[in-house]
Amino acid sequence: MRKPGCPNCHDFEPEATIGQKQRVHAQVPRHINSPNGFLIVSKIREIQEQASKGCSSCLLLYKCFLEFRESDENHRANRDDMYLQVELVSGRAAQVTIYSPRENTKSRDVYSKFHIFAVAGTPNPWPVLFKAPSSPKFALTDERQACFNYWIQNCRENHPSCQRPRFMPKRLVDVGLGNRGMCLVEDVHPACQYVALSHCWEFSEAATVQTTKRNLEETKAYISYMSLSKTFRDAVDICKWLDVPYLWIDSICIVQDDPGDWIDQATAMGSIYEGAYVTIAAHFDPNGTTDDGCCLNRRGFSEIVLNDATGTPFSTFIKWSDSHDISKPQGLMSRAWCIQERLLSPRVLHFRQGEVIFECSMESKCECGTLGIQLETMYHYKLKAPEKRLIWDNHITESPPGSNISTDIYSAWGKWRAVVRLYSAANLTVETDRLPALSGLAQRSPKRIFGDYIAGLWSNDLPKGLLWGYGVRGKVSRAQLYTAPSFCWTSLHGEELGLPLPPYSSSGCREAKILELQVVPATKNPMGSVKNGLIRLQAWVMETKIISVEPDSTLVTLDRIRTSIAHIDVPDEKKALAGSHVYAVEILGHELGIDFLLVKNSETVLGAFERIDIRPILADALPKSSGKTVETIPFRVWVQRVRQDVEAAGAGNTVLGDGELQALLAKNPAAKLLGFFEEIMSELTTTNMLDAQLTAQFSAKLRGVDTVKVEWIQKWVGEWIK
């Protein structure tokens, strides 16, 4: 007769204990479609108790819990009501969840998820656990080489949309396959395969390994492997491991103190990454060290060493939960150049602490399958990486004039905005690189849809495209050196950039008219850095004043505007604006209200203005007329109605008192349509007047309303057009 199993973990063999009336908590987890699948649930303290009695399976689970507690910065592991759930399916890694149930509800707080598996060829008492071909703690094994090469070759042979024109960079690092020494080579011919490296200069210590005019010839003769940083040495090892002879690294393949060479190579950067056999993305942990390199010795795994029944030690591995979200704006993907490099590369191997992820325009793959891990739906979604297709499908690349442009338009604009949102929050080592680091993407965007490029904006998106704005919670800053005109989002760096929806028909809308638009490139790259730029508009303008500022937010209060709260783009500039006169420039007027830009007089260019804010005024924010329907009428009809109401209210008098005027405005249905009247009434005692020329123009338009005082007409029109 079989010895009774552990009542908590069932020795990882629940099916062997069912007939013994043991406490099996549940059979066949919801998402595991297998007759051999079981769900085991137990309190942590019960697992600890059974581990102390000699249960090796509970000892493994409790050691996993202790590993979690070591990394738990919030000390959640000290709770008494914590449970451990194990999902077991033969031939797969066991999935373990640590959680606590919430009171009076069926929901729970999940603290950690991880997977447990063994390694083939080593002792292990649990047949149910998956056995990986080799230790997962080192990336460059024979098994993974076969796996990664299969991913790359499958893309090259079966994904037509991932194939790009062959391109050879001016310089490459010869990694020294065979017995050759490593060196920098120029103008390699004939064209052959090379790997490109995407890395963060700070964590790769690129500044210590640079090609300059002084050492160029020396570098072409020989490069010492040990003189390279850890990241660069790892990249060389990966190249050799993949049997690719050449490697492109920006700090070595560009002469860093030669401005002309830097501009030439930066302009060609898009083609360099497009033409690569594969790109190595050297991800890094912001809390890690430069010794992490390309994460070849991975910290995303823990090793638990136990003894079997004979006292022989054996290893079991834990793979900690990994979101698989390679586009998350942290680490490598918080760098602007690296975002462009990822999107332009046809194939990328993301070397990360948890595992390597392969990405192309058609699919993404991870190592989980090689470790017996079945990805959840959420992780599958994040692996799809839809923004990768921003460049590689026909919606964003230059498609033929005869293609269905109406189908492409909305998708193309939406995808460009997704790129911009990723890019606007990204960091740069050199702040003036913001436009150069975007130029490769801009060059490959569909001009037939977008129009002309203006430092991050597109002509076919104007004037609506001027209505971009950053979120109020994120930090926004302006570069100390000039990067772009203030009307372009590239002039700022910040989080939560909001962009208008794709362009739509302006029928029925009043919009600013663009009279002139220009930017002056700073280099021969027309989509790179700019010297200056301007946009000349014909639009309604109102002068106002910033009368107060909120100390702990981006809010300021404006004078004379019905919706009087505005958000300043750069909070650090807010204090200096207090009390200053600014101008509200209407960009769009529509049935929902108006959208305007707030601008100030330029401190550097006489007669010009600089943007400081965007602020929409919506119809819902305007005074409402007691639930009555607001009607839109021609101006001449409004004049007639005001004339009739004045005659009725004044009973033949030519002058109305203030009280009679307010009664008139409360009664007149046309007047209720115009929100600015309420502001006018509150300022009847002020002396704001129109200049003589504007008074003559608008008095002519209102000629015939002789029963209303001229001063009132002057004030109404004056307050409106300002």
Image: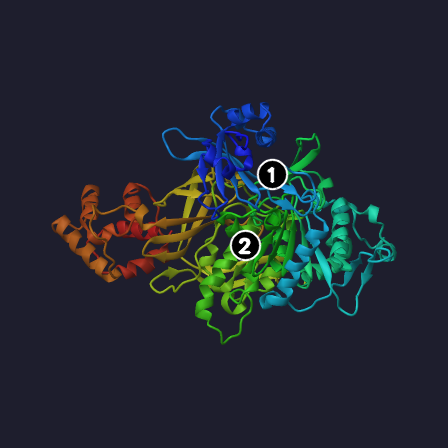
Task: Tell me if mark 2 has few (under 14), some (14-19) or many (20+) residues whose alpha carbon lies within 10 angstroms of its own.
Answer: many
Residue 415 in the image: state x and y as whole percent: 50, 59
In the visual, does 107 lie left or right of 395? left
The kind of residue on which mark 1 rests is Trp
The one of 435 and 107 positioned closer to us in this rendering: 107
Residue 220 in the image: state x and y as whole percent: 85, 58
**Circle 1 sits on which residue?**
126
**Circle 2 sits on which residue?**
385
Q: Total of numbered circles in the picture?
A: 2
The residues tagged by marks 2 and 1 sit, at their Cα atoms, a distance apart of: 36 Å
Q: Which-is-in-front pick, marks 2 and 1?
A: 1
Task: Tell me if mark 1 has few (under 14), some (14-19) or many (20+) residues whose alpha carbon lies within 10 angstroms of its own.
Answer: few
Q: Is residue 200 above or below residue 636?
A: above
The kind of residue on which mark 2 rests is Ala
Residue furthest to the left in view is: 651
In the visual, does 510 lie left or right of 495? left
Residue 399 in the image: state x and y as whole percent: 53, 71
